């Protein structure tokens, strides 16, 4: 973790980006839950915001978005860990769904190609946010990179 920046000057901007990603997942989950209520829990579902979804994926995206929003609001490096692990989880899930996209039996989340793309983008955004949102007291943060390398700040 020596190369991960601490107390990055654009940290508030990255936290806002993480909050927007979480809010998008919550809105998508709520709309998907409303749209797919009364249908099967898994299998092919409906299109919400241009993406394929079913009840299971709506609940998962709502839960992931809620965790992102809660940890972003809490801060204290809890958001860094949550964004990192949830981002990687979304990438793994998107890869699985990309592999089973054209099958009806194992496409449990009812993904379409647009859902895979959005899942990848949100996952990558969360990972990026986790890389630049870490904070530490000035005494523990160390010197800025320019000073460590012997250049003037």
Image (spheres, rainbow, N blue to C red):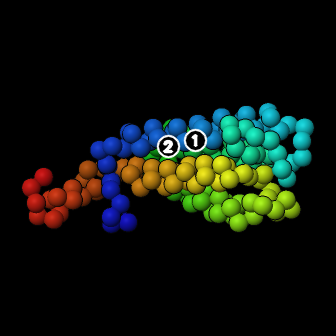
Q: Position of residue 34 (x, y in %)?
A: 79, 33
Is 83 on the left or on the right of 46, as rendered?
left
Q: Position of residue 153 (x, y in %)?
A: 13, 52
Residue visible at 86% across and 62% down? 105
Helix, strand or loop status at disc 2: helix
Q: How many marks?
A: 2
Residue visible at 85% across and 53% down? 43
Is 32 on the left or on the right of 130, as rendered?
right
The answer, for residue 61, to whether it is visible in the render is: yes
Q: Sort mark 2 into few (<14), some (14-19) or many (20+) by Cα contacts within 10 Å.
A: many
Label drawn at residue 18: 2
Helix, strand or loop status at disc 1: helix
Q: Position of residue 59 (x, y in %)?
A: 75, 44
Q: Position of residue 142 (x, y in %)?
A: 24, 58
Gap between marks 2 and 1 measured at Cα: 6 Å
Residue visible at 29% across and 44% down? 9
Q: Nearer the viewer, residue 135 or 102?
A: 102
With respect to residue 128, does 49 lie above or below? above
The image quadrant where one finds the N terminus is bottom left
Is 111 on the left or on the right of 152, as rendered?
right
Find residue 46 and report its image quarter: top right
Mark 2 and mark 1 residues within 8 Å of each other at the beta carbon: yes
Q: Sort mark 1 into few (<14), some (14-19) or many (20+) by Cα contacts within 10 Å.
A: many
Q: Which residue is mark 1?
A: 22
Residue visible at 83% across and 39% down? 36
The answer, for residue 89, to whether it is visible in the render is: no
């Amino acid at each position: 973790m020596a190369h991960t920046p601490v107390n990055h000057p654009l940290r508030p901007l990255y936290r806002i980006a993480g909050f927007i990603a979480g809010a998008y997942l919550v809105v998508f989950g709520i709309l998907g839950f409303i749209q797919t209520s009364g249908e099967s829990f898994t299998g092919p579902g409906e299109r919400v915001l241009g993406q394929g979804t079913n009840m299971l994926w709506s609940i998962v995206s709502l839960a992931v978005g809620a965790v992102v929003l809660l940890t972003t609001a809490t801060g204290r490096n809890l958001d860094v860990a949550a964004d990192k692990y949830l981002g990687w989880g979304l990438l793994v899930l998107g890869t699985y769904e990309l592999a089973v996209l054209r099958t009806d039996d194992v496409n449990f989340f009812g993904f379409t190609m647009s859902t895979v793309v959005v899942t990848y983008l949100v996952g990558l955004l969360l990972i990026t946010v986790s890389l630049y949102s870490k904070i530490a007291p000035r005494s523990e943060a160390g010197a800025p990179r320019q000073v460590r390398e012997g250049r003037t700040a």
